[in-house]
Amino acid sequence: MPIDILMPALSPTMTEGNLAKWVKKEGDAVKAGDVLCEIETDKATMEVEAVEEGTLGKIIVAEGTQGVKVNAVIALLLEEGESADALGKATAPKPAPAPENPKTEPAKAEAPKEAVPAPKAAAVEHGERLFATPLARRMAEQAGVDLAGVTGSGPNGRIVKADIEAAAGKTKQAAAPATAAASSEAPKTAPTAAAPAAAALTKDRVVALAGNIPYTEIPNTSMRKVIAKRLTEAKQTVPHFYLTVDCEIDQLLKVRAELNGRGDGHKISVNDFVIRASALALKKVPAANASWSDDVILQWNQVDIAVAVAIEGGLITPIIKQAEGKGLGTISSEMRDLGARAKAGKLKLEEFQGGTFSISNLGMFGIKEFSAVINPPHGAILAVGAGEQRPVVKNGALAIATVMSCTLSVDHRVVDGAVGAAFLKAFKGLIEDPLSMLL
Amino acid sequence: MAEQNFDLIVVGGGPGGYVAAIRAAQLKMNVALVEREHLGGICLNWGCIPTKALLRTSEINHLLNHLDAFGFKAENVSFDIAKIVDRSRKVAAQLSGGVKHLLKKNKVTVFDGTGTLDGVAGGNRKIKVEKDGKPVADLTAKNVILATGARARQAPGMEGDGKLIWTYKDAMVPKALPKSLLVVGSGAIGIEFASFYHNLGVDVTVVEMMDRVLPVEDEEISAFARKSFEKQGLKIRTSATVKDIKKAADSVTATIETQGKTESITVDRVIVAIGIVGNVENIGLEGTRIKVEKTHVVVDGHLFTGEPGVYAIGDMVGPPWLAHKASHEGIIAVETIAGMKTHAMDVTNIPGCTYCMPQVASVGLTEAKAKAAGHEVKVGRFPYIGNGKAIAMGETEGMIKTVFDAKTGELLGAHMIGAEVTELIQGYVIAKNLETTEAELMETIFAHPTLSEMMHESVLDAYGRAIHF
């Protein structure tokens, strides 16, 4: 089976890009790390590298094509020994799993995931081109040095051989602190400050940092790698801030018990109420139902709520679409269905890709409160804690109430403090007065 | 005498000094240049340029002697050595005039005289300029660049006398062509003169102390060159030394010892080209922190001498003794003084060219040096006989050799011998300076039909992919 090469997402907010140039031609042998093509967004031009070895079988999206959707198949790579005949058997361009969402089907997950060419992480961050000599690029790859962390000493900051040698040397030093003393003598002719070490987290380095204690290796699945990459990127590129509110849920629990006691098969969870309340609050405060793009802020006309579900080896975020128009019963049954199929690895792509807002609930584990990492392009994520009895002050006297703390993580580029607060106020109002959710 | 203040004083107007002065002027410095003899220095007046004019003559002579191969016929071809020398001097004069113009255009103030470091005053360096023992000017500047160059090394008992025993200067302006010549030393200078005189019909013997000619070049290139020279009729003695010199009225008898065997030859003239020594005397280094080792001033990667405000560049700071190295050092020194970010000179990126016949050019590490430095290497070779343009030109003698690091694909060195390699080498120098690997060189399209195609093929050959051989 030829491997699909997909349009990569160069940044969390990227949905489409232009295919600027094919570096490889059809029929060219491709090694892992070879530059296949150049992708252009409004922010930057990036090289797309091959992750797998083979022959470039067919170019599907021609050079110069504008507005290629992320994850569209742009070319087919023939594996070693595979003839061009296999191209015919390859399915027509099909949407492939988005790199930002963990896979649901572990068996199939590996192959297409790894075929997603990894854009050079380095240049993504600030939307700048990364300048490095071919030799420096190759040496960095061989030494496991991330070019993004290397300061170039060549003309116009170009990363040259000497910078990689310095960075690789530093990585080694970090792994073996004992040798640090010996290498304290700075090179005499180096006029500029040495490049900061590109801290590649190699296994050896981490083991050394931990003090060489015994360990068991757990392979990084593709899902794990995606989680690591996406969340690191989110936390580094999205300016998070956090707002916490306490909601009393005694009323809500009462209504819930009533609804569930009617014997019509409904088994509505507290989380279903949270989804419904979030959807209605977002409808009320649409400024919080928005995503950042470099050109404009996109305020969504519908509320699609992604709900984090823990699954074997990671997590996935199935989506309740147009939740603002769905009643508790619908939300509840949809959520139960999505959750079950998520755990079984049977979600369809469109069921976990997208969303405008997310919810992560750790209440069932007794967590009082926490802050979650925003899942781009969402503008916010609500972290829901456990409902527990706490002393509260009512009318100047101590009383007992069941309180649930919720923390909203907000992308400050899209949502300011006052807007976040307005959303939480609306949310709290709905949660504390559940009958208003019926309106 | 009133002191004249500048931002920078450059002592020496050779390819190091005048380039430094112009670069400094570009950077808005007020610059003084002190030159005792000729603007353009040895390179322009007594080195690179006039010798190239002479070598062009010998190339033409070579062609004239092979006209038959191209279908021409000419009889009674002859030359006038005086005219040949005159042309060479005119070329040098023209270029020296050009340098004068460039300095004027850049508003560099030129002082005719010898510049000497003369202490410090008020945080400024002082330079005393004298001509024939008489004071010319007292200059001050925050920074000084010394670029006084070098001169031929003299061998005891074979000191140049301008008559029988020549240095490069005498060899460039012969009044008459000798019938026979002994060239001592087979570095670039020795071999270029040997080749020039041999091509004009002189019986030339070369004596080299090392075990091969052009000892700084790759062993294979040295061996190729020797074979080629000997085929042309040059006599070559390696691992050999001149034991004794006896001068007669118009000839010299030299005793040469070659690996224990002695022979005695009588020649009209002797050219001594056994290296050079730095011009470090009488420029006021005494009493400063400037250190001199093996006749060369010691500097750091940015040409700083250790003495506040004093930099030194070019031949006076050591090998390779090449004009383009001096010029580049001049740029580094000036930009360092200007507070710009500069890089230390990487000697493996300096090309070297020898204008003998066939020409020799190289950059980077030889195969042996690459191995000695711990590289596992991939070596590519391509012969001129496999190249269409070379055959069409009637220049089928030569080869291009490339040395790569097997692991990283770094181009470690390139070594060439054959027609026009001195023009070709720059392709590899650019590649090396940009730190390309074999991959980029392989993917580069080389024009057909050119000699440069061999540069491509040599790279391909290193990876077992040569197409035409």
Image (cartoon, rainbow, N blue to C red):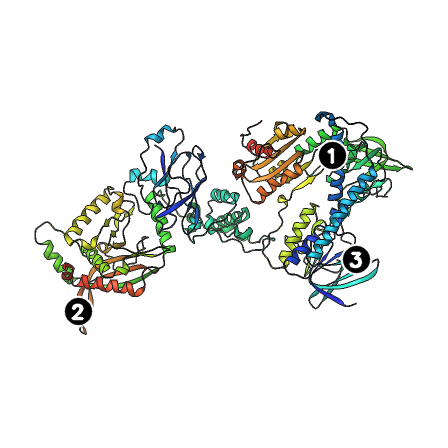
- Residue A438 lies left or right of residue A232; in this view the side is left
**Chain hosting mark 3:** B
Q: Nearer the viewer, mark 3 or mark 1?
A: 1
Task: Tell me the distance, in whole angstroms, between the alpha carbons under discs 3 and 1.
Answer: 38 Å
CA separation, marks 2 and 3? 101 Å
* Snapshot quadrant of residue B469: top right
Which residue is more in the foreground, B35 or B230? B35
What residue is drawn where x is 85% and y is 42%? B157
Which is more foreground, mark 2 or mark 3?
3
Residue under label 1, please give it: B59
Q: Nearer the viewer's eye, disc 2 or disc 1?
A: 1
Chain letter for mark 1, please: B
Residue B295 visible in the current orientation: no
Classed neighbour count for the residue bearing mark 3: other residues with Cα under 10 Å, few (<14), some (14–19), many (≥20): many
Give the residue type at disc 1.
Glu
Q: In x, y percent, where is residue B21?
A: 69, 56
Where disc 2 sits, the SS reads strand
Outermost residue, bottom side = A396
Q: How far apart are the alpha carbons under marks 2 and 1?
A: 108 Å
The residue identified by callout 2 is A399
Residue A409: name its quadrant. Answer: bottom left
Callout 3 amino acid: Gly
Residue A249 screen position, x and y as percent: 17, 62
Looking at the rendered structure, the secondary structure element under dot 1 is: helix
Chain letter of the residue carrying label 2: A
Name the residue nearer the viewer: A213 or B133.
B133
Q: Are marks 3 and 1 on the same chain?
A: yes
Residue furthest right in the image: B249
Depth check: B138 or A140 in front?
A: B138
Q: Which residue is mark 3?
A: B113
Which x, y percent locates residue A438? 14, 59
Question: Mark 3 or mark 1, which has the lower sequence index?
Answer: 1
